[in-house]
Amino acid sequence: MKKIIKGGRVATAADVFEADILIENGKIVQIGKDLSEVGAEIIDATGKIVMPGGIDPHTHLDMPFNNTVTDDDWKSGTIAAAFGGTTTILDFCLTAGEEKLSAAVEKWHDKAKGKSAIDYGFHLMIGDLTPETEAELPQILEQEGITSVKVFMAYAKEFQATDRTLFKAFKIAKDLGAVVMVHCENGSVIDELVEEARRAGHKEPIYHALTRPAELEGEATKRAIELAHIAGATLYVVHVTCKEAVDEIIAARDKGYNVYGETCPPYLTLDQSALAQPGFEGAKYVWSPPLRPKYHQDHLWNALKAKQLQTIGSDQCSFSFKGKKQLGLNDFSKIPNGGPFIEDRFSILYSEGVAKGKISINEFVDMISTSAAKIFGLFPQKGTIAIGSDADIVIFDSEVKREISAKTHHMNVDYNPYEGWEVTGEPVSVLVRGEYVIKNKEFVGVLGSGQYIKRPLKTTAAEALNI
């Protein structure tokens, strides 16, 4: 059915204007004043901001980790994402041991099948480039429409790749036109610091942060940048948390390197003191890289404003406090790493950024949607409001205030790191390809209606458009 969104203030990464939007067959077909169409459903957006749907470039749904599995699967995770204004996610497909890449990708397709309420794509994690994996990689990326691979410099016992593997991944990605995403921490040194803390009898959650200092994030970021540059590859640094990493990214971009950076809501708004709360409460704030001292937040906001960091990912990786976070009750190193942010990513950035005057509405749209679409090959199908683009649209009430709470969120976890926070702004209705997923703050979507989006391998749009 045709729909016309009327009376709203349209916001893209470039413009803000009053206009109606005509939607037909899942696409935006006309933008203008006083549009009319026989038989079209009229959506009244008077007094609201109409934005492109959010693109979350960093999620971990139904992911095995730390001897357990994340609590949000593709059902609860994508419903929560939709409530939060996100219409497309890019999830990480993990590989393991001798497993074929094709088998790993198929496993992730099975996880999403029949469950996803919104559109999605994959990044492909690379742990070890054996001759077999190296031969298979180009075919899998082309066949599956995956434009991004992930390499860990952290989690020495689980995922960490060698520098040789990282460099080879950069070279292969350069030839294929893919982006290499890197978790930049020095995992081997962190493991040594963790063991030192444990031998000294430390078990409290705060030691998760104290054994992962910002200097090790900065060092790993510098190393990844130089290896990517030597290979001529495009580097995307995930979840940047600190001045040390920001400074390395800025220096590299000033030299013309193809380096892009992502940060996440908690690093902009929460700080290391949360891990030092009495009892075991600090475990709710254990994720990696860890929260940093508060002064790092200004450096992150400034880097976003200057477009030295381009995107905001949720790094959704949810573990309930009872039962799962409590696995580390007597050993901080056994607390499952990760937090629940997929639902509040949109609102936190708007409330703390736009409503408080740190960023403009155009910068918000760019960070929450458009830049991710460009970097990962989704633009202009996704990430903007334009004729011919998918009708992925958020109707947003920028005036309403609400309180964040685990009692009212839609994620499948028993706590929220922002419990009790009052935020300004909330998605009212959310459409994916012209169909309601959220209507007047109620879920009306269909599980399994989310489509897998294949992306073309080529020179990245980020380079072509000088993000």
Image (cartoon, rainbow, N blue to C red):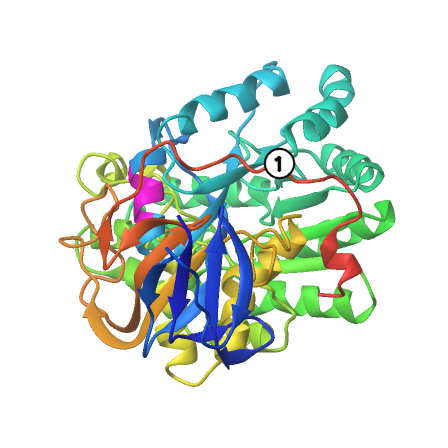
Q: Is residue 78 magenta?
A: yes
When asked about the image quadrant of residue 262, the answer is bottom right
In the orientation shown, which residue stands out farthest toward the front? Answer: 38
Res. 258 in view: no
Of 298 and 111, nearer the camera is 111
- Spot occupied by residue 334 in the image (x, y as percentages of width and height): 34, 36
Q: Residues within 10 Å of mark 1 (few under 14, many from 20)?
A: some
- Span highlighted in magenta in the image: 76-80
Q: Which residue is mark 1?
A: 454
Of 79 and 311, nearer the camera is 79
When asked about the image quadrant of residue 45, the answer is bottom left
**Residue sitting at 33 percent across and 55 percent down?**
206
- Spot occupied by residue 21 in the image (x, y as percentages of width and height): 47, 65
Residue type at tag 1: Lys
In the orientation shown, which residue stands out farthest toward the bottom? Answer: 357
Q: Main secondary structure of the magenta part?
A: helix
Of 329 and 52, nearer the camera is 52
Q: Quadrant of the C terminus?
A: bottom right
